[in-house]
Amino acid sequence: RSRYQTIFAKRGSAAAAPTAGLHFSNTILEQLRSKGIEICELTLNVGLGTFQPIHEEIVEEHRIHTEDYDIPGDSAERIIQAKAAGRPVLAVGTTVVRALEDSARKASASGRLLVSGSAEADIYIYPSHPFKVVDQMLTNFHLPRSSLFVLTAAFAGRELLLDAYAHAVQSGYRFYSYGDCMLIR
């Protein structure tokens, strides 16, 4: 139980850990901060639906699960300021990508980039999604035929992702929760 916690975990309301965060330690975060990198925290309640495979032949017909998230006001403002200044926003994990892009979709009616507060991500991100907030992503190698794989393909491009997966298999990388990760920019 203790090994399946990220250093970001504050309360136990998620069905699973947002596993991209497992790659970080307090030492690594301090090293990043010392280089001037801002770190904004969100609350993510990863749902069991995250692990549900896609059974539809047409990816767009998949019905995705929902997940609760909370974006604190200061995190939303710092992300908005970063985007306005042309600084890249790096999301650590697909659940963060979903939360930020869901918030951006919901904020578009108000003319803002993001809205702070609690919400339920019901966004399904697949190829052709116009990313509004996330510029870079650190994510694990996900299982094929999962919504996480599809989201990553939407971000990186299908061919580049398939090339990365071929390299990972050939090199013996580990997949899934305790697996290796990749930075996509």
Image: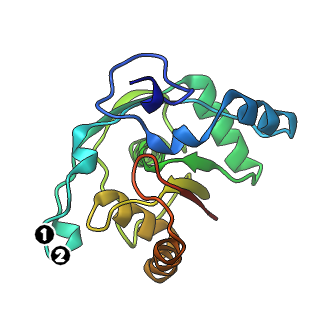
Q: Say which quarter of the image contains residue 45.
A: top left
* Amino acid beneath label 2: Ile
**Residue ranking furthest to the front:** 172
Q: Is residue 145 above or below residue 177?
A: below
Q: Residue at x 55, y 45 (%)?
A: 113
Would residue 109 be found to the left or right of residue 73 on screen?
left
Report the label total. 2
Would residue 39 be found to the left or right of residue 47 on screen?
right
Residue placed under numbered mark 1 in the picture = 56
* Amino acid beneath label 1: Glu
The spot of residue 13 in percent (x, y) is: 33, 21
Real-space Cα separation, disc 2 to disc 1, in angstroms? 5 Å
On residue 97, the disc is none
Residue placed under numbered mark 2 in the picture = 58
Q: Which residue is drawn at 39% across and 46% down?
A: 102
Q: Quadrant of the C terminus?
A: bottom right
Question: How many other residues sit within 10 Å of disc 1, few (<14), some (14-19) or many (≥20)?
Answer: few
Q: Is residue 134 above or below residue 172?
A: above
Q: Residue at x 46, y 73 (%)?
A: 169
Q: Say which quarter of the image contains residue 143.
A: bottom left
Q: Is residue 145 above or below residue 160?
A: above
Marks 2 and 1: CB-CB under 8 Å?
yes
Of 90 and 10, nearer the camera is 10
* Dot 1: element: loop
The spot of residue 178 in percent (x, y) is: 45, 46
